[in-house]
Image: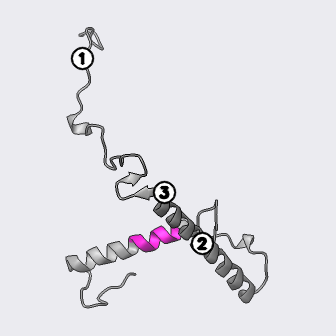
Amino acid sequence: MGLGGVGGGGNGAPEWRSLWATLRNTVEGANGYLKDPNWSNIEEAGRRRLRGFAGQAFLLACQLLGSNIRKLETFMTQRTTSTPEGPKGQARTRRHRTTPDVAHYRPESTDQPLARPA
């Protein structure tokens, strides 16, 4: 459903779409982090073996606490082991594609044709 015209921008304004897309990506990223089956896996209620709403809510809060601690540990580790230029003692790697674009790809020519003329 979305926000519709909330905030005065509406669906048509480019500023509104840009802001909405940023916020939506943030929420989806957090959902993916919290639902990771190797860590907190909040999507699977069977991992929280208590009956009742209060028990489920308490264990879910503990899972969220664990996820937040994991994020803080990762942040602190990266902060102490890297510099703005990249990890200590190393140059930063490029983040964008280094291979040529498919539109500009030209295979190397060989001496023999790939097929005989018909």
Label of residue 69 in the image: 2
Q: What element carries label 2?
A: helix
Among numbered discs 2 and 1, the one appearing first in the sequence? 2
Type of amino acid at the residue the image marks with label 3: Thr
Q: In which quarter of the image is residue 40?
A: bottom right
Q: In which quarter of the image is residue 109?
A: top left
User: What residue is shown with label 1?
Assistant: 109
Among numbered discs 1 and 3, the one appearing first in the sequence? 3
Task: Report the magenta residues as a range.
Answer: 25-32
Q: Which of marks 3 and 2 is in front?
A: 3
Q: Nearer the viewer, mark 1 or mark 3?
A: 3
For the residue pair 5 and 64, the one nearer the viewer reads as 64
Type of amino acid at the residue the image marks with label 2: Ile
Q: Which colour scheme is used?
A: one colour
Q: Residue at 75%, 85% (x, y): give it.
A: 55
Count of marks overlaid on the render = 3
Q: Is mark 3 on a helix, strand or loop?
A: helix
User: What residue is shown with label 3?
Assistant: 81
**Predominant SS of the magenta segment:** helix
The location of residue 13, given as percent across then percent down, is 20, 80
Type of amino acid at the residue the image marks with label 1: Ser
**Is 26 included in the stretch rendered in magenta?**
yes
Relative side of 32 to 95, left or right: right
Q: Residue at 76%, 86% (x, y): give it.
A: 52
